[in-house]
Amino acid sequence: MPAQPLSAPEREEIRAGIERCETDSVIAGRLGRHRATINAEINRNGGRARYTATAAQTRADSSRARPKATRFDADPVLAAHVTERLEAKDSPMTISIELARGTHGLVASLSHECIYQAIYAHGRRGLRAGLHEGLHRRRRCRKHRVFGPPAPKKSPLGLFNPISLRPSVALERGEVGHLEGDLIIGAANASALVTLFDRASRYLWLADLPDGYHADGTLAAVCEILDRIPEQLRRTLTWDQGREMARHHDLAALCGIDVFFADAHSPWQRPTNENGNGLIRRYVGKGTNLAVYQPEHLRAIETRINTIPRRSLDWDTATDRYHAAVAMTG
């Protein structure tokens, strides 16, 4: 369905938005219009410095009052040809290209959009009504496009703890036990590895997801890792907002750990995990079927990475820092 013309109240709102020095996007969002519509309206009526709602409405009314002859009204031969091709189930795009090439003996420059507009006018723009039946989707009218702010998407996580509620000591790396988690995805998204890093010591744990990264498998794999960590050192876990953590409430209850989620599209809020996954990729190449890695292979990768001296740890290893913390728990 073609967009409805701007109304007089909408033009008054545009004028008010200009006076408030709002951008075209802000005005468009409030009116539920596309930004380009607002921009064109302002520019065709003198620009921001000269725009008035009354003059813009008068100009629009005058323009609509003049009947406009269509391309098909002026060229019956072209109209008959396009009608014939539509009845033969050709798409408007195909018709436009064939006219440009003269495929059927008629040469013309006619856009597919012009044909669509005539089809959906149902007899008012030079083509007969009912030609939409020959289109692929057979819609009687165009699908209405709604502009403005997108509707919020429902999260598969339900209610969750945002990272802003995580204890500050986790951010400061002041104690062992604040973990970051993520997945490494295998070939064709058919397998995955769970990676957990301790923020303070940079210690790594791995677990496999041979059947893909669904919520039940992720819950089992993370619980398997946490069972290897003393209860006193299961303080917090931070994850991204992936659907694989849909059972985070069960994880918190089963393993006694507080789960927090980073903001959407904010990998820098989990830097230990993001950087650590780059290390893991040295031993697990992209496009690999991760299901082939047995537990002993994963333990070997853990050991290799955890025994690399780190500049961030004053050239200690993650193993040194983590085991020292474990020893202090008694």
Image: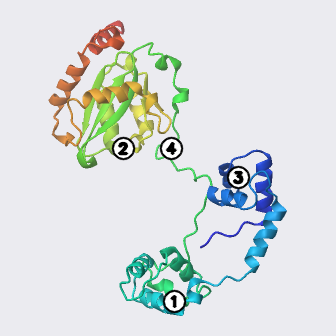
Q: Which of marks 1 and 3 is nearer the N terminus?
A: 3
Cα separation between marks 3 and 4: 33 Å
**Does residue 328 appear in this view?**
yes
Q: Earlier in the sequence, mark 3 or mark 2?
A: 3
Q: Which of marks 3 and 4 is nearer the N terminus?
A: 3
According to the picture, the residue beneath numbered tag 4 turns out to be 158
Are the residues at dot 3 and dot 4 in contact (C-beta closer than 8 Å)? no
Cα separation between marks 1 and 3: 40 Å
According to the picture, the residue beneath numbered tag 1 turns out to be 79
From the viewer's perspective, is the residue at label 3 or at label 4 nearer?
3
Q: Earlier in the sequence, mark 1 or mark 2?
A: 1
Secondary structure at numbered mark 3: helix
Residue closest to the eye, 28 or 305:
28
> Total marks drawn?
4
For mark 1, does the 10 Å Cα neighbourhood hold few (<14), some (14 to 19), or many (20 or more) residues? some
Determine the residue located farthest toward the right in the rendered image: 54
Please state which amino acid type lies under the numbered disc 4.
Answer: Gly
Which residue corresponds to the image point at 52% horizontal and 33% vertical from the top-left? 161
Which residue corresponds to the image point at 80% horizontal and 67% vertical from the top-left? 57
Cα separation between marks 4 and 1: 55 Å
Q: x, y (%) of residue 304? A: 20, 20
According to the picture, the residue beneath numbered tag 3 turns out to be 27
Q: x, y (%) of residue 153? A: 53, 50
Please state which amino acid type lies under the numbered disc 3.
Answer: Ile
Are the residues at dot 4 and dot 1 in contact (C-beta closer than 8 Å)? no
- Residue 215's tag is 2
From the viewer's perspective, is the residue at label 1 or at label 3 nearer?
1
Secondary structure at numbered mark 1: helix
